[in-house]
Image (spheres, rainbow, N blue to C red):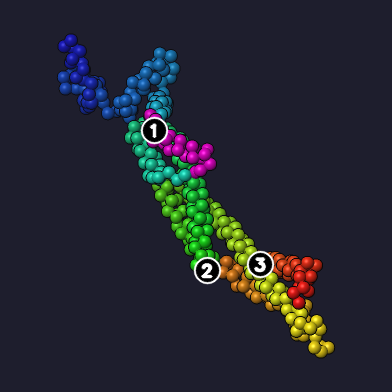
Amino acid sequence: MSAVQKLGRKFRESYKDGKSSTLKLDDEDSGIFLPEYHRRIPADGFAHYASGIWDQIESNKDLDLPTQQELLAQFRCDEIAREVLVAFDEKIVPLEGQQSEASKAGKPRVIPNLGSALKSARQQTLKDFETEASRYHKGVYGRKREELLEKVDGRLQALFIGQLTAAHKACVNHFTEAVTETVRQGQKKGTYDFAEIVATEKKLALERFETEAQSVLVTDAPWSTYTNQMSLFKKALDTVSSRLRQEEMRRLASRVERWVKTRLAEGVGLEFNSIGTGRGGSGAPGDAQKPASEKDLWDRVWKGFTDTVEHAETRFTDRAKGFDATPQEVEVGLWRLRRKSWASLRAKIDEEVMEGNIMLKLREK
């Protein structure tokens, strides 16, 4: 027992005696570990390393220590990577579940504080791996670190893109609702500038999306950029703006068409009602001349029609400019207005000359 205790005290670092090339095991002060023996093997990997060397010796193969060190590094780095991925999963899996459920429900939602969670998970995972694995063979450690980083970044990037997709949809919906509500309020007041409303809300939407995108960026991650998503978001806003403008143009056209229909109904009705008012009840005019009310009836109807449509076209064009409409959209709107106006005129004249209405007018006169 005494000899064993004495031997145990020799398992420490020592130096060779400059006068001798051999260790003096009998020397109380000498240890058996010399600096030149060091293979840079961490203590927690020594058992596996020694086992590998002994297997080589037992199988009578050439002992290649550098290869053994690389094999040890691969074994330990894989073990460490599995361990740090367990902790990584604990942080990331719940977030992946939230995003997946929202996507399946067709309602992608922005997860609060996702950016800080992604950054923390990535940094902590790499730090834990580097702390344990960087002591092993540098080449193997570098390769294993890249493999781990690829796995981690693949999952983080999916969450990152999912968050941007949800932010994209939420911001587009908010933009649509904001423009629609502001226009509705403007209609109640009787005045609003659609182009200005769209420009203002578009600026706010871009700022909102950029804020969401900035909050989810992950430092030092090569995939952490939202340039393409921002470009797609701008195109989506332009598409929605165009659709809202077309809807507003249709509403404008409908309002102008109703105004034209009302004005024509009043004007044409007055012209037809004035027929026969100059007879003075005698059944015939006092002279051979027709009264003014019965002269040039169709010329007056036509003039009233053209004046009304011209005024309506001016109103439509002025308001369409406020919508930032293209010349082609304005031309299409005017063409539609003219057709609708002509149909309104024809319908009103047909109504006035119906047999029943003519008979009623004759009885009244």
Q: How far apart are marks 2 and 1 (CA)?
A: 57 Å
- In the rendering, at what x and y percent does residue 173 appear? 51, 52
> Please, what is the three-letter code of the amino acid marked with disc 2?
Gly
Q: Relative to residue 164, is residue 278 drawn left or right? A: right
> Please, what is the three-letter code of the amino acid marked with disc 3?
Glu
> Please, what is the three-letter code of the amino acid marked with disc 1?
Glu
Label drawn at residue 190? 2
The quarter of the picture where the N terminus appears is top left
Label drawn at residue 257? 3
Label drawn at residue 25? none
SS at mark 3? Answer: helix
Name the foreground residue: 292 vs 25. 292
- In the rendering, at what x and y percent does residue 351 appear? 75, 67
Mark 1 = which residue? 90
Residues marked 3 and 1 touching at CB (< 8 Å): no
SS at mark 1? Answer: helix
- In the rendering, at what x and y percent does residue 139 appear? 42, 34
- Say few, some or many: other residues with alpha carbon within 10 Å of mark 1 (under 14 / 14 to 19 / 20 or more): few
Q: Give the range drawn in magenta.
A: 83-108
The quarter of the picture where the C terminus appears is bottom right
Name the foreground residue: 200 vs 21. 200
Residue 105 in the magenta stretch? The answer is yes
Residues marked 3 and 2 touching at CB (< 8 Å): no
* Callout in the foreground (3, 1): 3
Q: Distance between the residues labelled 3 and 1?
A: 64 Å
